[in-house]
Amino acid sequence: MSADDLPESFHVTTDEQLRAVSNLTRHRIMAVLRFEPATITQIAERVGLAKGSSSYHVRLLERAGLVKVVRTRKVRGVTERYYAMAARAIVLPDPGEGGPDVLMRHAVADLEASPVDGERHVRMAHLRLTEEQFAELGARLQALADEYRELSDPSLPDASLVFALFHPTPREQAEGDAK
């Protein structure tokens, strides 16, 4: 099964799914499966886990519907399973007021774990935009991410793109909450 055959998105809606995707190890396993199917052994090697640990985490992801077996083959009398993502994109629910955003926590953890001497493009900009500009920028960022996802070549090294466009808590409200 190729990535082209997958549904466009999978919406995380249950507590079980949210718990499964919230774990950093499982996040990294899903990153391995993002472009091509892999066996438990391949996943373990790429994530740096023991096969038993990888198997445990993959089972939790499979039970939550986030990954699935896409093919099997017999190897010396043992059935080898190849796992893949259940969809091209995982859509997380809004974390709600004051709730930590799982995606951002994983992005920061991945950035912190990336090679220090590797090339990075990390920026933060504080903008003042009209609602129309805000919506336009959000749509442009999404389109750019989609465009480059289509260009992704599984034979090339991974690169991660994360963006967050949001209205922060108004300064007066944040100061009032701190009192």
Image (cartoon, rainbow, N blue to C red):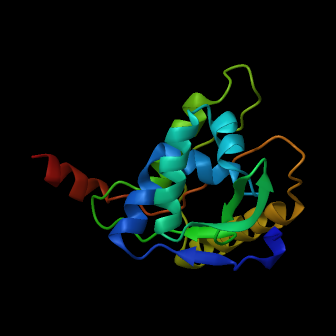
Q: Quadrant of the N terminus?
A: bottom right
Residue 42 location (% of width, % of height): 72, 42
Vertically, is 14 above or below 50? below
Residue 173 location (% of width, % of height): 22, 58
User: Which residue is the extreme one toward the left?
Assistant: 179
User: Which residue is the extreme one toward the top?
Assistant: 117
Residue 138 location (% of width, % of height): 62, 69
Residue 79 sits in quarter: bottom right
Vertically, is 163 above or below 9? above
Vertically, is 133 above or below 33? below
**Left of 156 or right of it: where is 72?**
left
Q: Residue at 64% across / 30% down in the picture?
A: 114
Q: Nearer the viewer, residue 122 or 45?
A: 45
Residue 12 location (% of width, % of height): 47, 72
Q: Nearer the viewer, residue 72 or 139?
A: 72
Total number of numbered discs in the rendering:
0
Residue 51 sits in quarter: top right
**Left of 153 or right of it: where is 48?**
left
Q: Residue at 56% across / 33% down in the picture?
A: 50
Q: Residue at 82% across / 40% down in the picture?
A: 157
Q: Residue at 85% across / 57% down in the picture?
A: 152
Q: Nearer the viewer, residue 20 or 124?
A: 20
